[in-house]
Amino acid sequence: MPTISTDRKLQTVITTFEVNPGTCQDLLDELQAACDEVISKHAGFISATLHVNDAQTRIANYSQWENREDFMEMLRSEEMRARSRKINEMCKNFEPVMYDVVYCSG
């Protein structure tokens, strides 16, 4: 379960995927499988959540890692590289961006 806080120095990664409405569920299934079978097994993984907009044209993945190096190591793994190629074929584009939490309210 993600915990968003400025107190803990984690690596936050928000990845956005642009998809066609007809392929949104297919990509969601692939992303869930990648998380369950590969991503969550890597050192430093804390959590991941998937979000879909109401038009089913965008998916956002919010993930947390202990540090940047753990996230980068996961991306470079052979299994994830193969899955990333498949994911890339299923969407118009995707972009992972690393963030620092600087403010929380509520």
Image (cartoon, grey):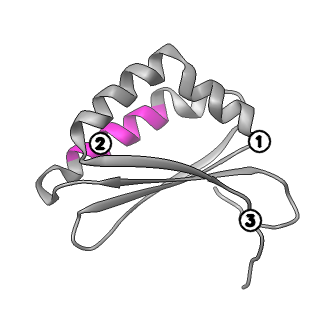
Task: Residue 54 in the image: state x and y as whole percent.
Answer: 26, 74
From the image, tell me which residue sits under label 3: 101
Label 1 or label 2, whichever lies nearer to me, is: 1
From the image, tell me which residue sits under label 2: 29
Task: Residue 3 in the image: state x and y as whole percent.
Answer: 71, 62
For label 3, count other residues whose C-alpha is less than 10 Å away and answer few (under 14), some (14-19) or many (20+): some
Q: Earlier in the sequence, mark 3 or mark 2?
A: 2
How far, Cα to Cα, is label 1 from label 2?
Answer: 25 Å
Disc sitting over residue 66 in the figure: 1
Residue type at the position of mark 3: Val
Q: 82 or 47: nearer the eye?
A: 82
Q: Is residue 27 magenta?
A: yes
Residue 96 lies, with reference to residue 57, above or below; the image says above
Report whether 50 appears left or right of 101: left
Residue in view at x 85 percent, y 58 percent:
8
Residue type at the position of mark 1: Glu
Label 3 or label 2, whichever lies nearer to me, is: 3
Task: Residue 58 in the image: state x and y as whole percent.
Answer: 31, 61
Residue 2 lies, with reference to residue 75, above or below; the image says below
Which residue, as the protein is rendered here, is positioned at the far right?
7
How far, Cα to Cα, is label 1 from label 3?
Answer: 13 Å
Marker count (numbered): 3
Q: 61 or 17: nearer the eye?
A: 17
- Is there a contact, CB below 8 Å, between mark 3 and mark 2? no
For label 1, count other residues whose C-alpha is less than 10 Å away and answer few (under 14), some (14-19) or many (20+): some
Quarter of the image that includes the N terminus: bottom right
